[in-house]
Amino acid sequence: MTVEVHPATADRFEDLATILAPKNPDTVACWCLTYRLSSRENRQLGAHERPEYVRRLCAQPIPPGVLAYRDGEVAGWAGVAPRSQLHAFATGARIPLLDDRPVWSVWCFRVRAGHRRQGTAQALLHGAVDFARAHGAPAIEGYPVDNQGRRIDAIMAYVGTRSMFEKAGFTKAADTAAVSAGTPRVLMRLELG
C-alpha cells in the first residue's frame, strides 16, 4: 500500500476531523490542543469550540500538522509546528530547552485502526520532518517514550517511541522529566542543515 503525507490544510479539515474528533460531538476531546494551548485556554474551549479552533489553524500559512493517506484513505495524523507555538514545550519545565534556536516539534501521532503496524506512524514522522524542513526549520525535536523495546499501550504511545525516531535519523539529545504510561520520555533531535 502506498502512504502519502500531506499538510493538514483547510481543504483537508474533514479528514483531520476523522482522526481527532470524538464519537460523541458533545465530548470535550483533545483535538491535539493540549500541548499547544495554556492550561487556562485549554479549559476554556468547549466541545464545539475545539473543532472550530483547529479549523482556523488549518487555514493558517503553517497548518498544525500532517495527515497520512493509505491508498487515498486518511490513515493518521502527526502534530508538528514551531516549538515556540506550543505552550507546553515553549514554557514548560518537563521538556528541556536545549538552546534558543527556532526548532520545530513533532509531538503527537494518531493512526486509525486498520492502518496500525503498517508503517503509517513512521511515514508520518518522515512527513513531519519534510514539512518542517520545507518551512525553514533548522532542527526538529520529538519527545517519545524510551520503552526499550517493551510493548506499550497504543493510546499512550501517541508521543512515539525512541526507536521510531532513531529509525528516522533522530538522536537522543537529553533526558526529560516527562513520562507517558509510566515510561520516561526523552528529547530526540534531528538537525535539518
Image: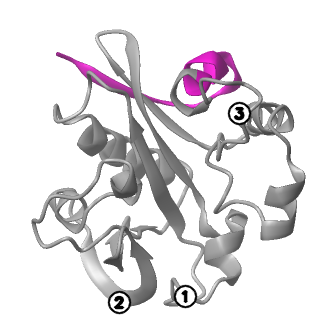
Answer above or below: position of 192 versus 97. above
Expressed as whole percent of the image width and height from the top left, the position of residue 80 reads: 53, 52
Badge 2 element: strand
Q: Quadrant of residue 180?
A: bottom left
**Type of the residue with mark 1:** Leu
Asked whether the residues under the numbered discs 1 and 3 touch, taking CB atoms below 8 Å apart as contact, a structural biologist would say no
Q: Quadrant of residue 169?
A: bottom left
| Residue in view at x 47 percent, y 58 percent | 106
Q: Residues within 10 Å of mark 3 (few under 14, many from 20)?
A: many
Q: Residues within 10 Å of mark 1 (few under 14, many from 20)?
A: some
**Type of the residue with mark 3:** Cys
**Residue farthest left in this picture:** 149
Badge 1 element: loop
Name the mark on residue 97: 1
Q: In the rendered view of the protein, which quadrant contains the C terminus?
A: bottom left
**Residue farthest top in this picture:** 72
| Residue in view at x 38 percent, y 49 percent | 155
Name the mark on residue 167: none
Asked whether the residues under the numbered discs 1 and 2 touch, taking CB atoms below 8 Å apart as contact, a structural biologist would say no
Q: Which residue is mark 2?
A: 175
Q: Mark 1 and mark 2: span between their CA atoms?
A: 11 Å
Q: Is residue 10 magenta?
A: yes
Answer above or below: position of 112 versus 53. above
Span colored in magenta: 1-17
Of labels 2 and 3, earlier in sequence is: 3
Name the mark on residue 58: 3
Answer above or below: position of 181 versus 134. below
| Residue in view at x 26 percent, y 81 percent | 172
